[in-house]
Amino acid sequence: MIDEQTLWDHLDALAKPRRSLGQLERLAVALALTQGRRDPRTKPRRVVLFAGDHGCVADGVSAWPSAVTGMMIGTILAGAATSNALAASTDCPLRLVDVGVAGPRVIDPPGFFQDARVADGTASLVHGPAMSTGQFDAAWQVGADEADRAFAEGAALLIAGEMGIGNTTPAACLTALLTRVDPDAAVGRGAGADDATLATKAQVVADAVARAVPLLAEDATAAIASVCGYEIAAMAGFYARGAALGCTLLLDGYVATAAALIAERLAPGTVGRMIAGHRSAEPGHAAALAALGLVPVLEWEMRLGEASGALVALPLLDAAAALLTDVAQLDAIGAARAD
């Protein structure tokens, strides 16, 4: 395993003014540390989108109905979603996994789709636990299996994304539960909630977190499952298994980072493989990143999900890897830096 000082010594010896690439050099160090090597790989890579529905949508926490989740799955399957466009532009193969979407199942899907449905959406966390621990474990395993598949096919860098109307509500619950930030500070407008919807969402989150907190010390999995989503649990399993395999984990936005909080809580050390692609416009995202000790690559006020922010940041990781592996050193070109 390589240490940070060795990486800085290497960068300082390259054929360029010392520390002249600023943040790119910091990113290069962070990337190399996730893989424990001076020549980190960013290719091959894989983005997996996990999809699920949320019972709390029926209780007024979202500006959109749950049916939109299924509509967006159709759009992704047709190759016409933002995630498709960004994945193609960054040469990042994409898979879509249904972990808990309500409604008809996809018939004869193409090869990049996996039907791994644990249930037809979660129960509403407004009225009780969103899922059982058994359901949480099943969704976690779906994500772990996807990490195994990606690794077996050569992936060195993994990105998880999500599609699930209403999922910023469980993300806010999980952030408040696992970082102990005030629930009000964890709640944002998601996909465009108006003031009335935002007020409902804030109350729902506060009540659900209040029920979950007493469980956390006694049974962390049960507490997390009570406010989770199937796609979020799957992303957590994906992260934990990907980290165990030695892959770099490039995080997307608020919901994906809530999954990262779960992974680090249940599989400590996972965060050592993580890089935060961006900080979203959701107010709780900063607290989630701070709890993980991660500094985002981008702060562009993005809040779409679908792994979009991570995919936009991905070319910067390619540049960081190239800096470490493809630039000559000063002594190799016969130059010497003055003291």
Image (spheres, helix red, strand yellow):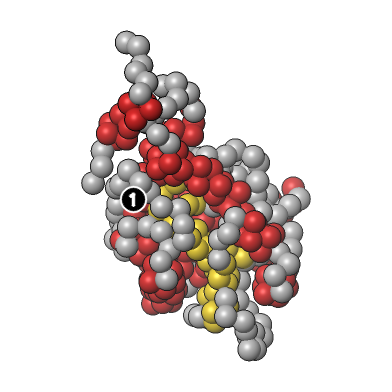
Q: Quadrant of residue 290?
A: top left
The quarter of the displayed image where residue 51 is located: bottom right
In x, y percent, where is residue 36? 29, 47
Res 71 visible = yes
The x and y percentages for residue 195 are 74, 48
Residue occupying the point 64% across, 56% down: 89
Instruction: Please tell me which residue lies in front, 11 or 245.
Output: 11
The residue located at (32%, 62%) in the rendering is 245
Which residue occupies 50% across, 63% down?
46
Q: Give the residue type at disc 1.
A: Gln
Left or right of 104? Residue 333 is: left
- Residue 288 % position (x, y): 47, 45
How many residues crowd around disc 1 within 10 Å: few (fewer than 14), some, or many (20 or more)?
many
Indicate the position of residue 76 as horizontal and vertical percent values.
67, 70
Q: How many marks?
A: 1
Looking at the image, residue 336 lies above or below residue 310: above
Q: On screen, 330 above or below 317?
A: above
Q: Residue furthest left?
A: 1
Which residue bears the numbered disc 1?
35
**Quadrant showing the C terminus:** top left
Q: Secondary structure at mark 1?
A: helix
